[in-house]
Image (cartoon, rainbow, N blue to C red):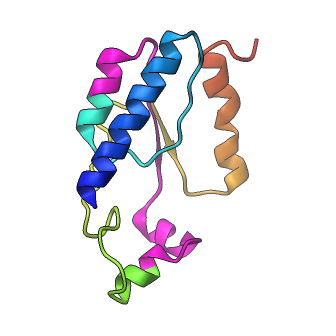
Amino acid sequence: SKKDRFKNAQRICQLGKFLNDQGFNVVTAILSLFPENREWNRSNIKNYYEVFIDAPLEDLIKRDSKGLYEKFSKGEISEVAGMDIEFLKPERADLVIKNTDSKESLLNYAELIAKKFSILK
């Protein structure tokens, strides 16, 4: 449910802060549905850096590796992000990556992100 997704997002944010406070570089790959979580991260996590991978819904539906969009269209499931759960794009992402090409072109950004945190020298 949307309520459960929010609760899970809060847990991920709090765990990220805990690990960051211990000196770890934390990277999480999540569907961040809630602006409140993003703002909490920005206010509470040192060196928070938000990357938004912007993929058109049409592309996500074509890639549908889990079959979620198909199940949604058949009425078998509900509460799917971008369908009956609104997805608000981040307004203040530090980096926006258009994900309309190959997976390899998307992965080219990994080094840029790592350098941001001096993980790679």
Residue 37 in the image, given as x and y percentages of width and height: 29, 34
- Residue 90: image quadrant is top left
In the image, 20 versus 48, the foreground residue is: 20
- Say if 100 sits above or below 51 in the image: below
Quadrant (top left/top right/bottom left/bottom right) for the C terminus: top right
Magenta part of the protein: which range?
40-69
Using residue 115 as the reference point, say whether residue 90 is left or right of it: left
Using residue 25 as the reference point, say whether residue 16 is left or right of it: left
At x 46%, y 13%, the residue is 47
Q: How many marks?
A: 0
Residue 103 in the image, given as x and y percentages of width and height: 68, 54
At x 56%, y 25%, the residue is 26
Residue 32 included in the magenta stretch of the image: no
> Can I make out residue 67 in this image?
yes
Residue 47 included in the magenta stretch of the image: yes
Using residue 88 as the reference point, say whether residue 14 is left or right of it: right
At x 66%, y 23%, the residue is 114
- Say if 65 sits above or below 90 in the image: below
- Residue 64: image quadrant is bottom right
- Residue most toward the bottom? 74
Residue 28 in the image, given as x and y percentages of width and height: 53, 36
- Residue most toward the right? 121
Quadrant (top left/top right/bottom left/bottom right) for the N terminus: bottom left
Residue 34 in the image, given as x and y percentages of width and height: 27, 43
> Can I make out residue 49 in this image?
no
